[in-house]
Image (cartoon, rainbow, N blue to C red):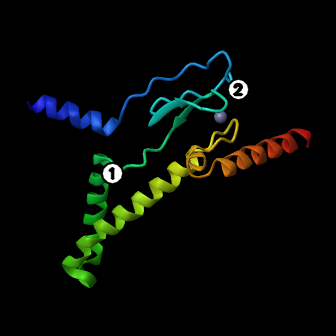
């Protein structure tokens, strides 16, 4: 019972395991960096290059433990000023971490090899297409200079 609880806790701390994907024969990039602890691994729908997401958009159990420790330290220093109300700092830390993780996740979405952004594709296909064209124009300018 106890060992199963510990194993599930350690599994949740590690996050889902992801196997490194092999490049397909028709991938744009054949050699990609292999991340050991990627949050998500998949093929880019446009260029078929193996991709990884390094950041999970959700707050994990380990993050809650970290925020609890940070809150206790903040309470230690803010207690003379705010007294027990300083315990509400936990919720400020939670919202700050949640928004930071979302910003980092959004930054990770566009493909570094072809510029395809799945979030823009969901919202507006024309805008996603324009962004891919812009990406390739910048890439060609970089090659020429
Ligand atoms: Zn791509």
Which residue is drawn at the image coordinates 33% and 51% (left, top)?
63
Q: Nearer the viewer, residue 76 or 66?
A: 66
| Image quarter where ligand 1 lies | top right
Across and down, in percent, residue 41 comes to: 49, 31
Which residue is drawn at the image coordinates 77% and 44% (left, top)?
133
In-image side of 7 versus 47 (left or right): left
Tell me the number on the disc at residue 26. Answer: none
Across and down, in percent, residue 60 comes to: 32, 47
Looking at the image, is mark 1 or mark 2 earlier in the sequence?
Answer: 2
Q: Element at badge 1?
A: helix
Query: Is ligand 1 closer than 8 angstroms to the Cβ of mark 1?
Result: no
Across and down, in percent, residue 8 comes to: 22, 33
Image quarter of the C terminus: top right
Q: Nearer the viewer, residue 139 or 130?
A: 130
Q: What's the distance in space between the residues labelled 1 and 2, CA to CA?
A: 36 Å
Which residue matches tag 2?
28
Tell me the number on the disc at residue 63. Answer: 1
The quarter of the picture where residue 86 lies is: bottom left
In-image side of 49 versus 145 (left or right): left
Which residue is drawn at the image coordinates 34% and 62% (left, top)?
94
| As drawn, 126 above or below 52 | below
Across and down, in percent, residue 89 comes to: 30, 70
| As drawn, 44 above or below 130 | above
Query: Is ligand 1 closer than 8 angstroms to the Cβ of mark 2?
Result: yes
């Amino acid at each position: 019972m106890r060992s199963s609880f510990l194993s599930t806790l350690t599994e949740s701390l590690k996050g889902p395991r992801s196997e490194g994907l092999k490049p397909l024969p028709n991938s744009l990039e054949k050699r990609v960096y292999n991340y050991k602890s990627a949050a998500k691994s998949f093929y880019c729908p446009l260029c078929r290059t193996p991709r990884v997401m390094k950041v999970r958009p959700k707050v994990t159990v380990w993050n809650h433990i970290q925020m609890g420790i940070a809150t206790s330290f903040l309470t230690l220093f803010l207690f003379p000023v705010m007294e027990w109300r300083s315990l509400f700092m936990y919720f400020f830390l939670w919202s700050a971490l949640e928004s930071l993780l979302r910003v980092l996740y959004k930054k990770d979405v566009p493909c570094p090899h072809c510029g395809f952004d799945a979030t823009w594709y969901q919202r507006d296909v024309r805008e996603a297409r324009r962004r891919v064209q812009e990406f390739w124009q910048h890439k060609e300018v970089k090659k020429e200079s």
